[in-house]
Image (spheres, helix red, strand yellow):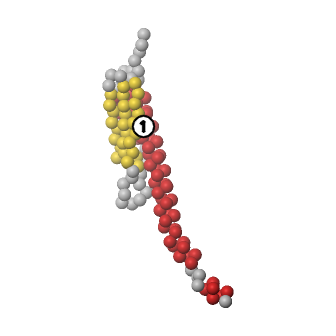
Amino acid sequence: MVRERLSGERGAASMELAITFPVVLLLVMTLIQAALWFHARSIALGAAQEGAREGRVQPASTARAESAAKGFLDQTAADLLTGRDVTVAGSPSSIEVTVTGTSLSLFPGFSGWSVTQSAAGPVERPTP
């Protein structure tokens, strides 16, 4: 009687594994993709802050801000942030640097998630 009862459950563990493994794998891949996106955001924010920091120094320069942000991206981003673009907007009293791009994608055929980060600050002015 015990033998008849156990024979009906043969292969159940294999079937459960075959059904749950792709779901677990997709979940893990999505978590890794999210981590790559957060890392790309962090790199973009660092580049924007570096550009704003350099652009604020007297004499204020949007070209220097853009160069500093691009230099930071060249050193740190590598393939993690693709299609990157640096936009600098300046006025006599402030400067804003925006870095946009796309994070690295683990899924073939899909582009990564969009990343946009900005940093702004007042232009330094000597006061008597």
- The answer to which of 40 and 5 lies nearer the viewer is 5
- The answer to which of 25 and 10 lies nearer the viewer is 10
Seen at 51% across and 64% down, the residue is: 24
Q: Which residue is mark 1?
A: 47
Q: Residue furthest right?
A: 2
- The answer to which of 62 and 76 lies nearer the viewer is 62
> Residue 95: image x %, image y %?
36, 28
From this viewpoint, is residue 42 visible? yes
> Residue 65: image x %, image y %?
37, 30
> Residue 92: image x %, image y %?
33, 22
Q: Quadrant of the C terminus?
A: top left
Amino acid tagged 1: Ala
Seen at 41% across and 15% down, the residue is: 126
> Residue 68: image x %, image y %?
40, 33
Q: Is residue 13 above or below residue 114?
A: below
Seen at 63% across and 85% down, the residue is: 5
Q: Quadrant of the N terminus?
A: bottom right
Q: Is residue 88 above or below residue 40?
A: above
Seen at 37% across and 34% down, the residue is: 97
Q: Give neighbour class at mark 1: few <14, some 14-19, many 20+ (Cα, 10 Å).
A: many
From this viewpoint, is residue 54 visible? no
Q: Is residue 26 above or below residue 117?
A: below
Q: Quadrant of residue 14?
A: bottom right
The total number of labels drawn is: 1
Q: Is residue 12 left or right of residue 60?
A: right
* Circle 1: element type: helix
Q: Residue furthest top?
A: 128
- The answer to which of 54 and 20 lies nearer the viewer is 20
